[in-house]
Amino acid sequence: MGRAEFVRTAEPLEAVGYRRPEVSCRICPDRPAEASFLRLCHRHRSRWDRYRKAHGRSAADLDTWAAEETPGDGFGHCQVVVCPGRADSPLGLCRRHRDRYRLAGRPGGASVPARWANQERPGRAIPVWFEDEAAFRRWCATVGPPLVLGQVNLLGLRPLLAAEVKWGLFAHTQRQHSRWDLDCVQNMVNFCRQRDLGSLTELELDECVKFTRMIAREMRNELRLVYYTPAETREAGFIETEHFGVRFPQRLGHLDLTGVSQRWLRDLLWDHLAGLLRSPKCPRSQGPFDQLRRACIELSAFLEVDAPGGGHDPTLLREEHMHRFMADQQHRERHGLPSLAMKRPDGAPTIVSYVARRMVFNNTRRVLRGAVESGAEQRLGLDRAFITAMPTAGAHRKRVRSPFTDEVARALADQVNLRQLETSDPLDQGLRDIWEAIILTGRRCGEILNLRLDCIGRYGGLAMLWHDQTKVGNYDAAIRIPEHLYQLLAERQRKTLARFEGLHGRQPTPAQRARMALFPSRVCNPNGQMALSYSWFHRGFKPWIDQLDLGRVVPHQARHTLATNLLRHGASLAHIRRYLGQVSDRMAEHYVHVAHSDLEDVLNHVWVAGPGAPNPGELLSSPTMDGTRPMTRERALARAGSAPSSRSSTAAPARGTSTATTATSSCSPAPTYSTGGANASSGPRSPNAPPTTPPPTTCTRSSSRPPAPSTAWRKPWPASGCWKRPWRWTCAARRTTSTACGA
């Protein structure tokens, strides 16, 4: 039986332990029941045990006995300040705090008679003794509340703090969220109560334990949207994206700008970020905003140590300050030095690379040029030369990824290696399925990771895959997939639904199913709507590549490999663009840059031995008649260069006749000479006379263009014989013939 089946058929159990809700005694309604299954207080529980012992367990009837018992008065509420429960003894403590008082060493020495239940009489109070009553009262004022299922005790908190906790709990439930155990929430409340805090903003997060710190940080993030207006965030040195109606996926939306120490530069950065957030072309991710912030922090750190007055007065900045900043960044890039201000998540400084320096230059220029356009430059008194001195970083040196080599492609698709990839996914979240889908479809990694649960189906009997190409704005795009991948994704659907049922004890509703991800994350994702991230996929994929020792391999190369294979099998750029989801043929050309190798394949069929070779006209790199493999390039060059006259070119036929060329020993088409009927170096001669010496190396090319390599002639000119005799030539590209003659 699987987990989902067990959850669906299991019977609910009664709550047990000290967290059970408090119930009243069936005889004394003002006293809590000590045993919830009997619903009897401490006094009547003792009397019931004596009654059963006297009358026999089988003969004793609880309801009959309870009808004859006399109810007793209650002991009031528990004396612990934050406890809403009722006291179950003359000591004035509830059952839970009575046990905790004993475990705490009984501060104050409060006690009652050992058999106080037998001494109860109507109108007679049970005595309570104290060794130090003040110590007992202090303990009651400082001890925390009991933990009760489904409850968070806010008693004893300041009113504002209690309201903030309520709002934080509500806001947490309004989006995809992580699981907050109420124990952790209660611990945070107790922590604030012990320090008598008036607001969550007064809480020192460094003093809290991990989960308390996480809960408090998220609540404070939500409260900033309430406590601050956009103008106030500008004064405080941060920006909230939700003030502008923008929230980026898996990000809190809080951008801290206090790393920019100069107030004028921080305000320019804030205004630029706010303009981007209000723009209809707002970026889809938080990456561009982080880059702008990093660039300004880098400039701020340099001005702090180099500019007069730390760069806080913009009127003192001149062109030479920007030139020194540029020189410093280029020096750090050239020598691999650390950044001035930026740190990694582990605290180590980042190294200034070409990409980092280019990002700093472009984004700093963008912010400062924005000040010119908005008029802030004149208002601040900033020198125009300081702004214009920052150049663009130049063209981006972007390397085009190459497709997988044959050896790498076989290794990445090998079943043994794929089973090894499964070991990097112990929770079976679909790492192998994701990789196989990327290989077979050529989709971008994000397009496979963000597949919806109902992403496959059949149309006219064909297996189809529906996905969103968010990078180019194509949504619900459908492509045909192989049957093997269809069955693989169908099995993943079954596993995802079984996991949802095992978590919730039911199948998802149609509305939930439409929003569920095929590869759901296990973090902050109770409804299964958030897909796995690329960082999760990379953490499992990269160690696998390192184990296979394949060198530098990235998943996106699978897309290049599929595009190149499609081109080699006859697909046009339009077909490739449509299948891969590109917006233009120019973009599709990036994926078929190896198409030039197809020209080499054509040349392999026209590389022939020259007239001076032992076997003129032999195809040096084509399969032989006996089925042996093609000749290698090195062997072809060796054979073609075995004769001293192998570099000779063909004589030119008369004007108006077909032109034939012979591939030389360098495996390139020979030049075509003048067709004027005379040798270019020997002067006028009869066009019918055969050449007696090879043409000179320096010659004039023909006025007509030489034939393309794809239409080069296979049969070479003969080494000797009558030049007037017609010869039949075979075209390598088409099965056609033409006649060339010497006159």
Image: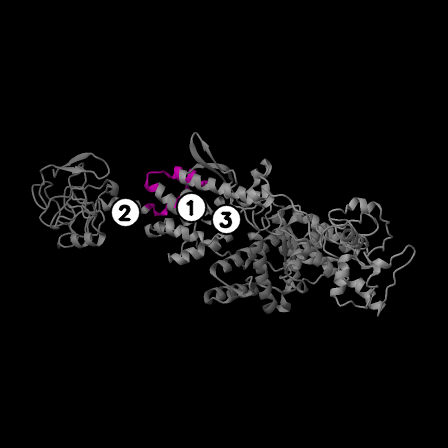
Element on which disc 2 rests: helix
Going from N to C along the chain, the mark reached first, 2 or 1, is: 1
Colour basis: one colour
Q: Nearer the viewer, mark 1 or mark 3?
A: 3
Q: What residue type is labelled 1?
A: Glu
Q: Is residue 241 above or below residue 658?
A: below
**Magenta span has 575?**
yes
Task: Give 259 or 477, whichever is nearer the viewer.
Answer: 477
Residue at horizontal 7 percent and vertical 43 percent from the top: 721
Residue 103 visible in the shown view: yes
Q: What residue type is labelled 3?
A: Gln
Q: Which mark identifies residue 600?
A: 2
Percent from the top left, x then y, of residue 258?
64, 60
Residue at horizontal 59 percent and vertical 37 percent from the top: 509
Given the current orientation, which residue lies at the most extreme left position? 721
Check disc 3: other Cα within 10 Å, few if <14, some if 14-19, many if 20+. some
Examine the image and state in which quarter residue 200 appears: bottom right
Examine the image and state in which quarter residue 545 appears: bottom left
Check disc 2: other Cα within 10 Å, few if <14, some if 14-19, many if 20+. few
Q: How far apart are marks 3 and 2 (CA)?
A: 44 Å
Percent from the top left, x then y, of residue 421?
43, 52
Quarter occupied by the C terminus: top left
What segment carries the magenta color?
A: 567-595
Residue 195 visible in the shown view: no
Q: Which mark identifies residue 436?
A: 1
Check disc 1: other Cα within 10 Å, few if <14, some if 14-19, many if 20+. some
Q: How far apart are marks 2 and 1 (CA)?
A: 31 Å
Query: Label 3, on which residue?
Result: 429
Q: Which amino acid does label 2 sit on?
A: Glu
